[in-house]
């Protein structure tokens, strides 16, 4: 367990300022910066330290049934909170064998972030009737402070939040592909032939402002026409609340419809899918996977048949922050 913080009453003896070379980093990057300490009265301490933390924070109200005295029940919402630190690191920037005497001091530092850190994330709502006011965060913070007698000085500190981007693996740089073939049955009973759909994205990692290009090949060997081809961008969320409740939902971000394909015909077509939300919507969250929070994306290409089940391919993609 890490050290705790304590108020030592030294806030009036000086000030401390943390500066970073940049405010955004990718997991595995080298973080550089400086800490400036201005001392007006002698401060006795053990070390000047930099604390780095990555945390998941969640708060929500959950519906429960409360028994009333008349034998009836009513629904009330109980407030819950959950904090989990998944990354903590303390860097001793400067050991102080005796004390800081009055003066101005500036120290530089650098350290490398772990490769596997999840991306920064934040949401403030979730489509679940049993949950209200959900707040879920993956966030990072750097804090410069003094270590004194085994504690960190809570009244002498300087903090900086940072945005984290997840690393892209080699497999994520390859296009996302899938091919599906199935029998086409009218009203799920009478076979009308077969149809094969193949889809491939131009890559599998995008920025929120990018436009994905999807190469589709449709071989309709059935006697039923494809009335419409749709490309749909989905966001899949999974949030673990406590030890026994997992929220899952899929949100449709955007949808683009295209013309169909005649019975017995084939078609190869490239579709475009803008990944940015509309001006009234917030920017897309980055793909991420923490201990309790997961956000992922997929492009679904669907072939619509009249009176028959749709044919679709699922193309997972990642979106950088």
Image (spheres, helix red, strand yellow):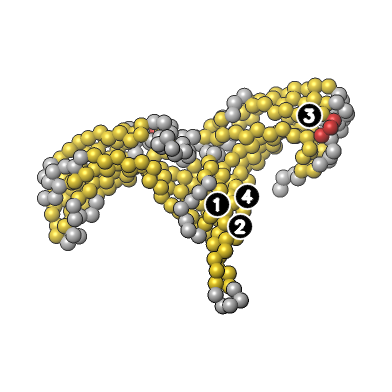
Mark 1 / mark 4, whichever is N-terminal: 4
Which residue corresponds to mark 2?
79
Which residue corresponds to mark 3?
15
Mark in the foreground, 1 or 4 = 1
Q: Is residue 31 above or below residue 220?
A: above
Q: From the viewer's perspective, is 87 left or right of 218?
A: right
Residue neighbourhood size for the residue with mark 1, other residues' Cα within 10 Å, grouped as few (<14), some (14–19), many (≥20): few
Asked if residue 172 can be seen in this view, the reply is: no
Residue 51 on image: x %, y %: 69, 36
Task: Compute the Cα span from label 2 to label 3.
Answer: 37 Å
Pointers 1 and 4 in contact (CB under 8 A)? Answer: no
Mark in the foreground, 3 or 4 = 3
Q: From the viewer's perspective, is 308 left or right of 287?
A: left
Mark 2 / mark 3, whichever is N-terminal: 3
In what element is the residue under mark 3?
strand
Q: What number is the disc on residue 179?
A: none
Which residue corresponds to mark 1?
133
Residue 239 on image: x %, y %: 51, 51
Residue 293 on image: x %, y %: 52, 48
């Amino acid at each position: 367990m890490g050290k705790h913080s304590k108020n030592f009453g030294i806030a009036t003896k000086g000030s401390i300022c943390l500066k970073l070379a940049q405010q955004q980093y990718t997991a595995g990057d080298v973080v550089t910066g400086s800490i400036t300490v201005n001392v007006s009265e002698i401060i006795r301490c053990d070390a000047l330290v930099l604390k780095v933390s990555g945390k998941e924070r969640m708060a929500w109200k959950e519906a429960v049934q409360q028994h009333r005295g008349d034998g009836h029940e009513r629904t009330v919402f109980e407030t819950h909170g959950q904090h989990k630190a998944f990354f903590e690191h303390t860097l001793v920037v400067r050991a102080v064998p005796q004390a800081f005497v009055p003066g101005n001091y500036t120290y530089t530092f650098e350290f490398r972030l772990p490769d596997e850190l999840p991306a920064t994330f934040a949401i403030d709502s979730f489509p679940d009737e049993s949950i209200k006011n959900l707040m879920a965060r993956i966030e990072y913070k750097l804090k410069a402070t003094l270590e004194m007698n085994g504690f960190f000085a809570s009244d002498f500190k300087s903090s900086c939040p940072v945005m984290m981007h997840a690393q892209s693996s080699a497999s994520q740089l390859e296009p996302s592909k899938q091919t599906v073939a199935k029998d086409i049955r009218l009203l799920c009973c009478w076979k009308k032939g077969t149809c094969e759909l193949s889809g491939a994205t131009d890559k599998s990692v995008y920025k929120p402002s990018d436009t994905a290009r999807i190469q589709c090949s449709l071989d309709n060997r059935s006697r039923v026409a494809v009335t419409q081809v749709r490309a749909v961008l989905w966001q899949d969320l999974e949030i673990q609340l406590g030890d026994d409740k997992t929220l899952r939902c899929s949100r449709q971000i955007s949808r683009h419809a295209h013309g169909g394909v005649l019975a017995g015909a084939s078609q190869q077509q490239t579709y475009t899918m803008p990944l940015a939300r509309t001006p009234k919507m917030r920017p897309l969250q980055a793909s991420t996977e923490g201990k309790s929070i997961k956000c992922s994306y997929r492009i679904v290409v669907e072939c619509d048949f009249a009176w028959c089940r749709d044919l679709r391919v699922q193309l997972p993609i990642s979106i950088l922050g």
